[in-house]
Amino acid sequence: MDVFTLTVVNAFIALVVTGVLALQNKAERQFRYQRYFMLAAIFMLLNAFFSAVHYAGITLPYWLLPALTNSLSIGAHLALAAGIHRHLQRSGQRYWLLLLFIAIYALHLTTFASSAIANRMLISIPVVLLINLWCIYMLWQHRKSELGKVYLAFIVTFAFNIAQFVLRSIYMALEYYQLVHTQHSSVIYSIGFFSLTAFAILIFGCIIMLSHGQQRQELLRISERDALTGLLNRRSLELRLSSELNRSARHNTPLSLLLMDIDHFKQVNDTLGHAAGDKAIRHIADIANEHCRDYDLLFRFGGEEFLICLPDTNLITAEQIANRLRQAIEQRPINAPEPLTMTVSIGIASCQGDMDWQTLLKHADQALYRAKRLGRNCIQNYQSNTGA
């Protein structure tokens, strides 16, 4: 396949990918990093278009080819890096990447760059290699996350790009300085273009995988969350509690459950309406969230019931957390629309990872029933209930 055909293929790939990413960005505006990937595709499209025009036999001015086309190639890598940086939510501004692109184009317009292809390689290749290494560094730090397999695919693709750039640059440098003489320069040049084509296909395949992976995560998150409060729902309870109890058993650490019920909630719905009832539930959920640690699990267990899983927490500490939570709710009335003081009853059960989640939950439910029987607005634990 000759170089002209390869540039046309590159242009077609970039055009298709630009269209696909534009449609994805329109459908999933919350994934803003896709705009950077779309910009990378546009840069590759422009680069391939001007290269195809050149190899079709049309003479282009130096400022357009190779100055702009080389800069567009680097710009595509910069846009990819910016997209990864945004996706991983790393701190720092990205505007300096635009400044770097402008600076590289300006350098290509200097006498030094225009005098020899080797000089342009000295400008472009090190920048591209550093960008690829930076991308690998960012992705490697997140390789054990939920999207770790996608990140590893990106890493392999960037490693392939580094290898092809290094090998191609070494050959071109040796040939330029007449250290090697070969009859296959055009073949090797075509292989270089093919490598860029392969990189484009691989990198945009990774981008599509990333987008679909995030879609799956978002759908999973929605399926696990209660629509009213945003808390974990009952559907996700079995998997989460089983996992925490297994971890508790492996490490021989305590685990506690708090089962919390809003006192006299039916009266709120009957007298103030369901809108006020929904507001009360969100109010309780917000306060509970404030009193939970980062690793605690908070579920909306039923209509007005909440379940809190406290890993690495013994009974005494669980009682302290429950008391603070009960007092906080009592001391913060809700406007619905008049100030309304809410109270809760809480049942507590603890174990050392030596029982299943159904049994532990049953113990917490029995403790909650006792708290209600004793007049509500109090806490009870299962151990005291059984006389242990």
Image (tube, rainbow, N blue to C red):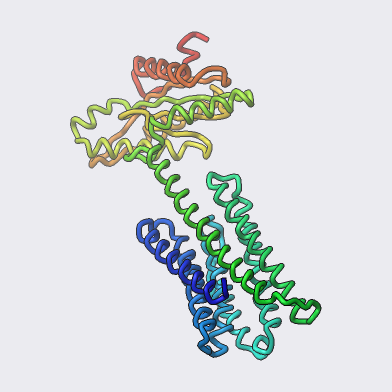
Q: Is residue 252 left or right of residue 64?
A: right
Residue 148 in the image: state x and y as whole percent.
Answer: 57, 47
- In the picture as drawn, the residue positioned furthest to the right comes out as 179
Residue drawn 53% across the image and 29% down it:
243
Asked which quadrant contains residue 301, the reply is top left
Nearest the eye: 52 or 148: 52
Task: Give the residue at x 46% y 31%.
Answer: 324
Name of the residue lying farthest toward the top: 387
The quarter of the displayed image where residue 123 is located: bottom right
**Callout count:** 0
- Residue 379 x/y as whole percent: 43, 22
Residue drawn at x 43%, y 38% as measured from the top left: 289
Image x and y of residue 165, in percent? 67, 68
Q: Give above or below for 344 relative to 164.
A: above
178 in relation to 27, above or below:
below
Q: Locate the N terminus and report the quarter of the image it occupies.
A: bottom right
The image shows residue 206, relative to residue 69, as above or below, that is above
Identify whether 302 is placed above or below 153: above
Q: Residue at x 50, y 14 (%)?
A: 383
Residue nearer the viewer, 60 or 352: 60
Which is more toward the observer, 387 or 247? 247
Q: Nearer the viewer, residue 147 or 328?
A: 147
- Name which quarter of the figure residue 378 lies in: top left
Q: Position of residue 336 (x, y in %)?
A: 25, 40
